Image (cartoon, rainbow, N blue to C red):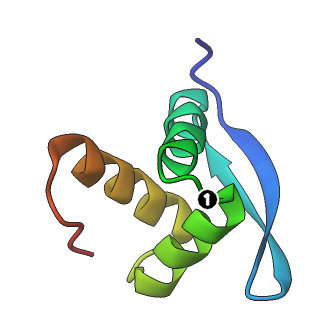
Amino acid sequence: MAAGLIKRSVAIAGHRTSISLEPIFWTALVAAAAAQDRPLNALIAEIDEARTTNLSSAIRVWLFTQERGAAPTQ
């Protein structure tokens, strides 16, 4: 899998923003949304509401803590 960043646009709270993540994180994020049976934008919006850092970093931390089975602390 390529190590470069992939930039995607998403809608959060009624506005569009772009997020740059490595392919492995996009794959994990899409899988997490599917596992929770919810839209990807809804999951990203939830992460966005709780974040204390930039959104891309918050998503990486959220995915890491989900994988570890721990509650995210941001």
Q: Taking 25 as reference, is 71 above or below it? A: below
In-image side of 59 versus 7 (left or right): left
Number of residue marks: 1
Measured along the vertical axis of the image, is residue 54 above or below residue 30?
Answer: below
Give the residue furthest to the top: 1
Would residue 59 be found to the left or right of residue 68 on screen? right
Q: Residue at x 61, y 59 (%)?
A: 38
For the residue pair 12 and 5, the one nearer the viewer reads as 12
In what quadrant of the picture does the C terminus appear? Answer: bottom left
Residue 67 drawn at (x, y percent): 25, 41
Q: Look at 57% across and 22% down and name the residue there.
A: 3
Residue lying at the far front of the rendered structure: 37
x, y percent for residue 71:
18, 66
The residue to which callout 1 is attached is 38
Q: The residue tagged with tag 1: helix, strand or loop? A: loop
Pick the quarter of the image with the N terminus: top right
Callout 1, which amino acid?
Arg
Q: Is residue 31 above or below residue 71?
A: above
